[in-house]
Amino acid sequence: MLDLKLSVSEVNQIYAELNSVSGFDFGNYAFSFKMRKIILLMHSLKILTVEDLIFRLQNSQHIVSEFVKSMFVSYSEMFRDAEIWNYLQEKILSKLLLKKEVKIHIPYCVTGEELYSLMLLLGLYQSTHVSILVSHPLSENEEIIKNRIFTQKDLKACQKNIEFLDFIKNTEDIFVGHTNQMRINHFFRGELNFEHCDILSQQHIAEFDLVLFRNRLIYYNEDLQTEVLRKISGSLNKGGLLIIGEKETLGQMSGKYKKLKSNLSVYKKKIF
């Protein structure tokens, strides 16, 4: 790894340029995350100076595209944090599915691991009155998600998670196909919709019963965390459920929710 040391002003300068050439504003992402992404990019391209990186951003749409993609982090495994999925299966879904209509939102989906984990779980219930809205940050994400191919490497990444699941025990129950050309064997019978939209521009008011937004807040600074959580909170029905990452908190929005289990980041929006 190149021994790069960048100042705050240099990092800000690079992201200002990225915003200028791509239209994506990552200014309110966590500084450590932004710094790490720059260093990884410069290392992969063997770029030694900030000036050279900015020049490349100004003259290569491919580099701009790769930089932007790297900022929208994908999940590396299905059923990450298996205890959350067990809790959903044991305590949440059976009650939630008693409703005549159930609406679920994944506000930020890149490659589909979280979505397919949910579809596999919901497929156990064979319910047709569930709709999932998948919002994705880049237009190309939708095709990637719909045509998601899983490799042996992907399978290995989620193997330990599967071992801790109470409702699925074998990878053969999840993946079908040949080596490095596997797809998800789900029985989801509900409705699936896609939306290319930045989370802060979404206009869903008191609409969803469950929102999955896990392991995203850690990439944002405090101001952006609050802004995003306020947006998500407004999209939830009263009594709706919000699931975030195990290392994440609701911060200033915590007063609007009740935590359902002390060791899990599952929250219920308060009615009053």
Image (tube, rainbow, N blue to C red):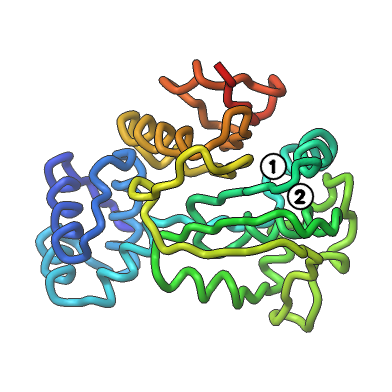
Locate the N terminus and report the quarter of the image it occupies. Answer: bottom left
Which residue is painted at 15% across and 52% down in the image?
16
Left or right of 187 on screen, residue 67: left
Which structural element holds mark 1?
loop
Asked whether the beta carbons under mark 1 and mark 2 sit within 8 Å of each other, the answer is yes
Left or right of 164 on screen, residue 109: left
Which residue is painted at 81% across and 66% down in the image?
187
In the picture, residue 264 is in which quadrant? top right
Q: What residue type is labelled 2?
A: Asn
Farthest-out residue, front: 100
Query: Which numbered tag is attached to residue 81?
Result: 1
Q: Name the residue under label 2.
A: 161
Q: Residues within 10 Å of mark 2 (few under 14, many from 20)?
A: some
Which structural element holds mark 2?
helix
> x and y percent of residue 261 in the render?
71, 23
Give whichever of 236, 185 is nearer the camera: 236
Which residue is painted at 22% across and 46% down in the image?
5
> x and y percent of residue 90 in the render?
85, 37
